[in-house]
Amino acid sequence: METVKRQGMSARIIKTMGLFGSVQGLVLLCGVVRTKLVALWIGAAGVGLFSIYNSAIDLVVTVAMLGIAASAVRDIAAAPEGMKNLMARAALRWGWVLGAVGAVAIAAMAPVFSRHSFGDDSHAWAFIALAAAVMMNSLTSIRSSIMQGLKEYRRMARASMWGTAAGVALSAPLFYFFRVDSIVPAILIFSAAMLVPTAMAMPRLRSDEPLGWRQTLSLGRGFIILGAYITLSQATSYCVNYLFASWLSTTASVDEAGFYQAGFNLFNRYAGLIFAAIGVEYFPRLSMAADRRRRVEVFVNHESMLILWLILPLTTLFIIAGPLLVRLLYTEAFLPIVPMISAGIIGVTLRGLSWCIAFTILARGDGLLYLVSEVSSALVCLGLNIAGYRLGGLTGLGISYTVWYAVYLAIVAVIYLRRYGLRINRSVWWLTGACLATGSLMALTEIAWPALEPLNWAAAAASVVVSGRALRRLWRH
């Protein structure tokens, strides 16, 4: 049986997580500052325009790029050493082509976007101008993916940090002097500010072998097919989110839909920063070892333990600090979402474990299987959310989130254990159970017996200490 040397792996992962966690934090902070400046100097109309234009750009980039930003990482990382640069050059060429397709598409459909968003053609020229942003964002995305596949993490992080900071610094004066007329130029400047450092940071892709268009098509076939499956799964997820938000706003009210989105962002998006930071290093490493059974098992088990030890204190701190977080990020009017947060944060444990396992499907390139699992999960999510709200209101939505990830974990675990014949260590299951039990008891105490809150504080302190010691051991070994 193949043995895998793990000395220093935890330290390397935690360092990478710290690096990209800082980047994610900076991006989040800059996003808040930019939105705050738009709201302060332009008002609600500016925030609305900013949201509509960026949503259109994100939609076109997501569809036009066919998911190659994710699938190219796998193919570049898994390629033999002598083929990596050639594969990266092919991915970059595909990025240019698909980015151009997206730019032409948004320009051609500008009147449609304008009428759908504003009811008339008055903003068509703005959408035509945003074609440049689609092109630049596509190139930034594929260049970042190439650096991720080549394990150029520091270059990737520096480019993202400089681009984000420069984008906010350059666009802020426009907001102040030109008000609502600055929205489109500011978006273009921000896209350019992200592209320039990314292009400068990417290493030169030297290769002795010439790359013709026929070879570009041949090399790109794999990540285009896998990327198309990823795009379809993302589209299904977006569709389900839209359908539920529409159902909630019509069944209950727009305010209730706003409460749900606010709570969901807290325990899903912000907790997801951990996964995003770790995934930068984990996915390429897993892709390189996808055909080596023992190595995959070691990586998945190790990553699962690391994620779970990070999630345990996060869960407990979210439960005890829920009211404070709501007041800081929103207002006291949003305090009704606190029970939803307490119930939903428990599901992050299941999300973490299923996340580690699900990456195996992508690393192996099983696009159709990935699509089936994600679509099944999305449909389960929709049904559980409707049932959860009908039975328990906002708190029921927190519970449905946890149940949803229990179902999703079962789906990906069956694929991992049965189809691939891989194993998950017993210690991973024990730690998962401990995290769930701790979170469930604390959430129940917070919701049903608030007088016992000091016990929750003690449990949170204990979880921080225990997790800290466990992570320290992982760092050393």
Image (cartoon, grey):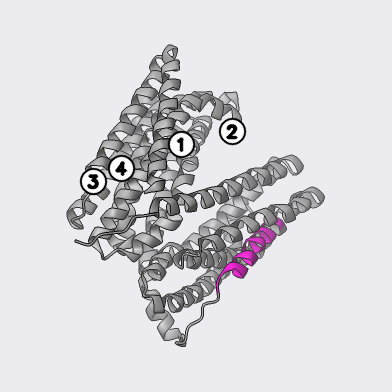
Q: Is residue 195 magenta?
A: yes
Q: Mark 4 belongs to which amino acid?
A: Val
Q: Main secondary structure of the magenta part?
A: helix
What is the three-letter code of the residue carrying label 3? Answer: Asn
Q: Nearer the viewer, residue 44 or 303?
A: 303
Q: At numbered mark 2, what does the secondary structure look like: helix, strand or loop?
A: helix
Q: Find disc 2 in the rendering and name its residue.
A: 329
Task: Examine the structure image and report whether residue 42 is included in the region drawn in magenta.
Answer: no
Q: Is residue 397 left or right of residue 133?
A: left
- Which element type, helix, strand or loop, lies under badge 4? helix
Around disc 1, counting alpha carbons within 10 Å, would you say few (fewer than 14), some (14 to 19), or many (20 or more)? Answer: many
Residue 267, labelled with which disc? 1
Q: Which residue is mark 4?
A: 380
The amino acid marked with disc number 1 is Phe
Instruction: Give the Cα separation between the discs numbered 4 and 3.
Output: 27 Å
Whole-number angstrom distance, CA of label 3 to CA of label 1: 27 Å
Question: x, y percentage for residue 194?
Answer: 62, 61
Q: Quadrant of residue 36?
A: top right
Where, quadrant-wise, is the N terminus in this rendering?
Answer: bottom left
Q: Residue at 49% x, 39% y: name it.
A: 265
| Distance from the alpha carbon under mark 1 to that under mark 4 | 19 Å
